[in-house]
Each structure stands twice: as structure tokens, then as C-alpha cells.
């Protein structure tokens, strides 16, 4: 199995990306790493690192798509970029199972939609991060930004994709699904939600638990939360932003709280560290683009080696555990 | 000035509501309290309290609208409910300046839209809570749930209403306005957002700072954040939910962290208390329904006496500082 890593995507590329990829190689057997990017620069970065050369391949892709580039235009014009060449290889190389990038989300989504085949029957791929819950488990939020305008059938399929992910990767047999809305009553929601609700409710293949408010996202009461990409993105970023804000408030409180607060902080440091780890989306790997025939993982733009390694291993796990097959199974009419 | 208080709205009605109203009377001069609800029960609650009888009026409204009632139906059928009678009095009594309720949000919104006149030119009233920011200031999020389906002109007017609120109540001369979206680029957003963007950008009366991600809501970089009611509701509740989740994680960490963590907690208690106070939406009063000729404040359903008192005083301030006049000023074409 080959996992293609965009060596030139993200704020800390290429150094931290390549380091992360090599770390992942050390952490798990059974896959080769394809580093996509300017070959000379990659070779230079590799010089200082120890690795099995039989497990590393370089895909020379001299162009770089930045966050400043307009995604659609960049994907069309920069045909030799690490994102375009990497995704092209993902589609064409039979051994390639996944593509991981910390680069421009827009460009990855656009290029993946153009270059990688969808699972038969899937109308729109969707972006799904895994969030931690207060109960210590996880919740999958789908879609978080791949589709800012949605039709009811998209969200119905997001439910399939999220459930397949929860089954295959989280090992949850009958994932509990909530529909993100502005109230818990069955009749609540946007026009879109009101059309999606009966589709989910009427689908016996799904364990649909009804509408949920954004307050419940991290509660641990749900395994999968289905949303249109616009609302899902807002929910995800509001959760992230509030968690960061809380840390800032705690830090400010400690800094301004004198010696007493500082001693208190030292004593509570392990607790804070644990919480920070729980809430750190970097440690939870990247967001997965589901609905394609192969795995695409989008890491945070600010990813360092550790989170790149986590994303590579996550991609490997997704490929090995057959998420795409699980999704396809939902779309195939079952015999009674 | 009369402030009408729904004595039978919320989880802790009528006892905590009435107590809160009486507390507010003690905290500020210059207004009378109208308690709407079953007269007998109100009189009984008042028996144990000390107050100036000249400042308290009872509006006998024997029916109660609960959260289980379907709002539109309840408003139509329960004509003698505290919400319907209270809002009717708000519209008809020249001295009545504001209505405060911790009851069913749907019923308050529905009844207010039916019974209270809008400011001339305003198409849709909107719900606007004030949130705390990490910089110690506040931010107004509008709309948070009054309109789950919006047209571009609604959001344009939400910007006016939010700015007027920030000017009149927060004392901000030229409020900085962000449009809640799924990215910061000018071209990001839902179809609706893409139509709203040029309206806000082209309006010289507004200090429009562009699209913002939900991550920035509590950052303190903005005074007003404009959203459709569906996304705004999700953003608000995701922020609330995450803040609560963080407290749960801290609490669990301390409980499981042995004696060391418990001592640390005791030392940091003032810091935690402060943060809890900052992030506690109850202390920040209720969400205001803007766009009507008079003030309507919706407190949290779980409000206790303290937050009811805060909401009553907030309603008084909004009325006194002339928010409705400020909103109207935005709608009147100005001489150059």
C-alpha cells in the first residue's frame, strides 16, 4: 500500500511534513510513503533523517499551490503542483490507497473532485473531522465545508458516509446519528433540514436519533452529526474557537492571579495538559474527505510533524479498514 | 416606564421569576414592574417579598404556554396566556417599554411578530444575544434563531440592528461588523452570504470588516456578527456547548487527579470563578429581539432570580438608550 503525502502543503512545509511522514513509517509497517513535491528539496530534507529507502518514493512535483491561490484556478493552471500530481497518482496508481495534505483545503477538495473517482452512487464527497467528546469518545461531524450549498440527497448520503466511518474506524456497530439543527423538535430547522429529516427518519439502515442542537455536539450522545457544509463548518470552528478562547482565559487568569494562581497552575498542569490533548484537533488526525474511491485526508494547515504522522496513520487505517466498502454497502439495495 | 415580566415563563417560574423582578426593582429606580400571569399565584409569591407596591402591577393572565406547546398554535389558542397578554399590553400601553420572558422562545417570537409593531422599514425582527469575548469586551451575534430562512435584505438589516445595539448599549461609535461564513475570503459562503456580502460592503453607513469564520466569534476582533438565524443559532449553541464541555473536562480532571489536583483547584478557584462568570450567558442578560417598536428580551429558560433581574435591567437600558431610534436612523435616508 502506498500513501501519498503532499510534502509542500501547510505552514510548516516541507520540513515538518517530511519529518512527520518518516515518523509514521517508523510507527507502522505495511505501507510505503510517496512524497509529492520538488524532488531536490525533498532529497535535501531527507538527508538528515533515518528511514528505509525501500519504503520512500518521490513524486517530483515542482509547483506549489498556496492558500493565496484561488483554488479552482490553481488546480487548473498548476498541473505540476504536489496536490494535482499527488491526487492524479492516487487515482492512477493501483497501489496508492490514500493522499494526505496539509495544504489549501479548497485546492484539495477541488482537485480531488476532479481527479479521483467517486464511489458509485455518491453525489457529493464530504469533509468529516473526528471531534473528541466529554465522555472520552469521539463524534464525526459531516460535512464540514466541502459543500456550502446542499440538496437533501447529499445529507442523506453524508449520514451513510459518517455511519460507515464510525463503523469501520471507531468500531461502533450501530452509530447514533443526529441532524444538526436549531432545535430538537422534529419540525425544527431550515427548509433543507425539513426535507432531510424524513429521509433519515424513514431509512431503516440508519440509527437516526433526530434533530440535535449545536450544544450537544461534544456531549458524547451521538456518533455522527450530519450537517450541510456551511453550518457544519460554522459548528466545527465555533467549537474550536471556544476551546481556544477558554485556554486563553485560563492563561490570562493565571498570569494575572499572582503567586497563588501560579502554584495552583503547577499543581493542575497534568489536568490541563490532558484536556488540551483531548481538545487538540491536531492529535485527532485530519478531516477525511469521504465519498471517493480512495482515501483523502486533509490535515490542519498548521500541522507539525506529530500531526502529519497521525494523519498518515489515520489514512492507512481508513484504507485498511475499508471505509469506502462500508459506504458502498449502504448504497447497494439489500436482499430482505 | 413599565417593564412587563412573564411571571410564568421558564423552568423556575413563577417563584424565581418574581423574585428576580423584585430584585431588579431594588437595583434601579425609574420603572414599574408588570407581572403577567395567574393573579392568585403571583400574589402568593409576592407575600414573602419586600417591595414598593406602587411599583408593582399585576396583569392577570391565567393560561400558560409551555415548551411542549407548538408555538404558532399556542399563541393562537391561548389568548389569556402570560406571553400573549403581556405582549398585547406592551403594544397597547403607552407607558410599557419592554417585555421580558424566560418562556418558550418560539411562542415569544411568534406572539411578538403578531402583536407588536415593527420599526417602519424593518422586514424581520432578529434575536441578538451579547457574548463575552476573550479581550473582556462583548460581541453581538444577530440573528440567533428568529429567522431560519433568510433573504439578503434581512441580513443587511440585521447589520443595522446589531450596529444600533452596539452603539446605544455598548457605547461603540463605529461598530466593526463581520459576516459569519465558512471562510474569510470575500468569495466564501453560501449563496445567501454571497448576495449579502456586496450589500454590506457597499453600505457606507456600516463599518463592514468582511467575512469571518466561527473561530473568530469570541476573539474580540468584532462588535457585531451578522448571520442567518439557522447558522447563528448553531454558532451560539456550539460556543455555549463547548464552554460547558470544557468546564466538565476540567471538573472531571480535578476529580480524578488526586489530592494534588484538588489543592491546585482550591488555589485556582478565583480564576475559574471569574472565567465561569465571563462565559456565563446568564449573567449577560437575555437575547434581545430587535426590530420591533418596543423592547422584547428573551432570557434563558433556566434563568434564576439573578439572571431574570439582569434581563429586566437590560430591557430598561435598551429602552432608555433608544435602540429602536438608532435602528430607525439607519433606515432613514440621510442628507449629505
Image: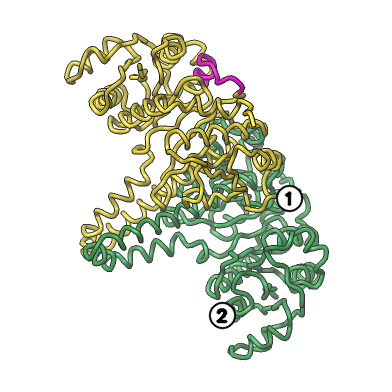
Chain colours: A green, B yellow
User: So how many labels did they put on this image?
Assistant: 2
Q: Nearer the viewer, residue B118 or B29?
A: B29
Which numbered marker is on residue A301? none
Task: Give the alpha-carbon distance from disc 2 to disc 1, as whole Å.
Answer: 33 Å
In the rendered structure, which segment of residues is drawn in magenta? B110-121
Q: Which residue lies under the disc numbered 1?
A: A124
Say whether residue A177 is magenta: no
Tell me if A94 is positioned left or right of A158 in this view: right
Give the vertical position of B113 relative to A29 (above or below): above
Tell me if A209 is positioned left or right of A110 in this view: left
Q: In this view of the protein, can residue B165 be seen by the observer?
A: yes
Residue occupying image coordinates x 54% and y 39%: B232
Give the vertical position of B207 relative to B4 (above or below): below
Q: Which residue lies under the disc numbered 2?
A: A23
* Chain letter of the residue carrying label 1: A
Image coordinates for residue A138, horizontal then vertical, percent: 49, 56
Image coordinates for residue B192, horizontal then vertical, percent: 68, 38
Mark 1, secondary structure of its residue: loop
Give the vertical position of A151 relative to B34 (above or below): below
Give the vertical position of B163 relative to A286 (above or below): above
Mark 2, secondary structure of its residue: helix
Residue occupying image coordinates x 82% and y 65%: A77
Say whether residue B111 is magenta: yes
In this view, the residue farthest toward the front is B336
Discs 2, 1 touching: Cβ within 8 Å: no
Quarter holding residue B284:
top left
Amino acid at each position: 500500500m502506498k500513501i501519498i503525502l503532499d510534502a509542500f502543503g501547510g505552514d510548516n512545509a516541507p520540513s515538518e511534513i517530511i519529518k512527520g511522514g518518516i515518523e509514521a513509517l517508523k510507527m507502522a509497517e505495511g505501507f510505503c510513503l510517496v512524497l509529492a513535491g520538488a524532488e531536490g528539496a525533498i532529497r535535501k530534507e531527507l538527508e538528515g533523517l533515518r528511514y528505509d529507502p525501500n519504503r520512500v518514493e518521490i513524486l517530483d512535483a515542482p509547483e506549489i499551490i498556496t492558500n493565496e491561490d484561488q483554488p479552482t484556478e490553481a488546480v487548473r493552471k498548476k498541473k505540476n503542483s504536489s496536490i494535482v500530481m499527488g491526487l492524479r497518482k492516487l487515482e492512477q496508481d493501483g497501489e496508492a490507497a490514500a493522499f494526505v495534505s496539509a495544504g489549501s483545503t479548497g485546492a484539495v477538495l477541488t482537485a480531488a473532485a476532479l481527479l479521483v473517482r467517486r464511489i458509485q452512487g455518491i453525489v457529493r464527497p464530504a469533509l468529516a473531522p473526528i471531534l473528541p467528546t466529554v465522555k472520552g469518545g469521539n463524534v464525526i461531524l459531516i460535512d464540514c465545508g466541502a459543500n456550502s450549498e446542499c440538496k437533501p440527497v447529499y445529507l442523506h448520503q453524508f449520514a451513510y458516509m459518517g455511519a460507515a466511518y464510525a463503523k469501520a474506524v471507531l468500531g461502533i456497530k450501530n452509530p447514533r446519528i443526529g441532524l444538526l439543527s436549531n432545535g430538537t423538535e422534529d419540525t425544527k430547522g431550515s427548509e433543507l433540514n425539513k426535507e432531510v429529516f424524513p429521509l433519515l427518519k424513514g431509512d431503516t439502515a440508519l440509527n437516526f436519533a433526530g434533530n440535535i442542537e449545536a450544544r450537544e455536539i461534544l456531549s458524547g450522545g451521538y456518533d455522527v452529526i450530519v450537517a450541510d457544509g456551511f453550518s457544519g463548518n460554522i459548528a466545527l470552528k465555533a467549537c474550536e474557537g471556544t476551546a481556544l478562547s477558554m485556554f486563553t482565559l485560563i492563561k490570562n487568569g493565571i498570569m494575572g492571579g499572582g503567586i497563588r494562581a501560579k502554584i495552583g497552575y503547577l499543581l493542575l498542569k497534568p489536568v490541563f495538559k490532558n484536556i488540551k490533548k483531548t481538545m487538540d484537533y491536531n492529535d485527532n488526525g485530519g478531516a477525511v474527505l469521504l465519498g471517493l474511491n480512495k482515501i483523502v485526508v486533509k490535515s490542519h494547515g498548521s500541522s507539525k510533524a506529530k500531526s502529519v504522522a497521525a494523519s498518515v496513520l489515520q489514512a492507512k487505517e481508513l484504507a485498511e479498514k475499508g471505509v469506502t466498502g462500508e459506504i458502498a454497502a449502504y448504497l447497494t439495495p439489500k436482499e430482505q
